[in-house]
Amino acid sequence: MHVELISPALEQPPEGLPALKVKDVAAALRVDTSTVYVAVRTGLIGSYRVGAGRGTYRIPRSALKAYAVERGIPLAELGVAL
């Protein structure tokens, strides 16, 4: 029996700049990649999966921006174009 414990990810990426990889988001936030994975799995950062099987997460730039704004992180300190 398979039980889905995390909320489903977005089906399609949003238009605009390419989405970010988990390692890019971790570098921008100056945290470990495991911290980003936890935020993605708990729904704190919006994401979608790419690829077959387990795939990989991609984080839309708008989701990173929303996450930073909610936590009071200055966008200029992120070092990525949003």
Image (cartoon, rainbow, N blue to C red):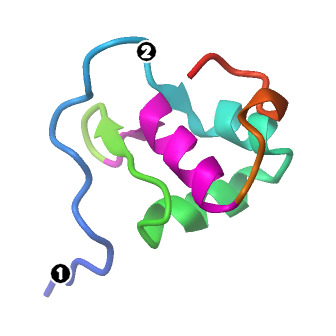
Q: Quadrant of the C terminus?
A: top right
Residue 10, image x, y percentages: 22, 46
Residue located 34% across and 48% down the image:
54
| Total numbered labels | 2
Of mark 2 and mark 1, the one earlier in the sequence is: 1
76 left or right, relative to 65:
right
Q: Is residue 64 magenta?
A: yes
Residue at the spot x=66%, y=38% of the render?
25
View extreme (top): residue: 17
Q: Position of residue 74 (x, y in %)?
A: 77, 41
Residue 13 drawn at (x, y percent): 26, 28
Residue 20: x %, y % from top left: 53, 27
**Where on the picture, by quarter, is residue 2?**
bottom left
The one nearer the camera, 31 or 4, is 31
Q: Which residue is mark 2?
A: 18
Q: Which residues are magenta?
A: 54-71
Queried whether the magenta region covers residue 37, the answer comes back as: no
* Residue behind mark 1: 2
| Residue situated in front as seen by the camera: 19 or 79 | 79
